[in-house]
């Protein structure tokens, strides 16, 4: 397993958008297709909890997938991922458009991907992150390679690094309190 390059905490703290690929990053890249044509994917619960912590801290999150998937839509809805982009093979264009809509420079974005179509976005982002099983082009473009594999806590590892660095606002991890209006 490749050892991760050391990234200063200040660089993690500058992240204002955490965007990621889905298949191979949030999943182990396996796709189960049933005889009736439906598909299933296996997502890590610990990744989901880490994303929830970041979302509750106010860090914008995005999933950018090269393929359309009902399973991805369901999981993104469950986790309240605000930016779900599917069917976009040009990940850099999708990331650039989203960052522009949010008023961010690419240098303020972290992007996590595992394949050749992710490499341009990995190079352009302020922090490019890949997983140990990533394609050589993705690994070469990444600033950081997680210790954990895609679908097995790699996203949570990144969430924990962002949280430890204080992205986006510093302080302890505390979910936002919900208020009820009548």
Image (spheres, grey):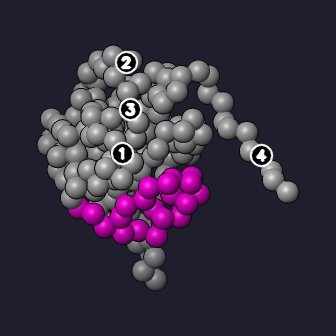
Q: Earlier in the sequence, mark 1 or mark 3?
A: 3
Which quadrant, please, contains the C terminus?
bottom right
Circle 3 crowding by C-alpha within 10 Å: few under 14, some 14–19, many from 20 = many
Calculate the distance from the C-alpha at mark 4 to the C-alpha at mark 2: 33 Å
Image-quadrant location for residue 122: top left
Residue found at x 48% / y 65%: 73
Q: Position of residue 82 (x, y in %)?
A: 50, 54
Q: Earlier in the sequence, mark 4 or mark 1?
A: 1
Circle 2 crowding by C-alpha within 10 Å: few under 14, some 14–19, many from 20 = few
Nearest the eye: 165 or 108: 108
Marks 3 and 4 close (CB-CB < 8 Å): no
Q: What numbered label is drawn on residue 10?
A: 2
Q: Earlier in the sequence, mark 3 or mark 4?
A: 3
In this figure, which residue is indicated by the disc labeled 3?
A: 15
Residue found at x 17% / y 50%: 116
From this viewpoint, which residue is outermost toward the bottom? 36
Q: Nearer the viewer, mark 1 or mark 3?
A: 1
Start-end of magenta stretch = 68-89
In this figure, which residue is indicated by the disc labeled 4?
A: 179
Calculate the distance from the C-alpha at mark 1 to the C-alpha at mark 2: 21 Å
């Amino acid at each position: 397993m490749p050892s991760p390059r050391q990234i200063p905490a200040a660089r993690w703290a500058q992240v204002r958008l955490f965007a990621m690929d889905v298949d191979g990053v949030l999943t182990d890249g396996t796709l189960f297709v049933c005889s009736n044509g439906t598909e299933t994917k296996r997502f890590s619960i610990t990744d989901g909890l880490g994303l929830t912590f970041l979302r509750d801290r106010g860090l914008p999150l995005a999933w950018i997938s090269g393929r359309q998937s009902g399973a991805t839509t369901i999981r993104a809805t469950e986790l309240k991922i605000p930016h779900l982009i599917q069917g976009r093979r040009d990940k850099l264009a999708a990331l650039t458009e989203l960052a522009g809509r949010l008023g961010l420079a690419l240098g303020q974005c972290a992007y996590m991907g595992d394949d050749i179509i992710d490499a341009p976005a990995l190079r352009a982002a302020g922090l490019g992150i890949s997983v140990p099983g990533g394609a050589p082009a993705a690994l070469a473009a990444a600033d950081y390679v997680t210790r954990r594999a895609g679908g097995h806590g790699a996203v949570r590892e990144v969430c924990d690094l962002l949280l430890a660095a204080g992205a986006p606002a510093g302080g302890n991890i505390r979910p936002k309190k919900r208020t009820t209006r009548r």
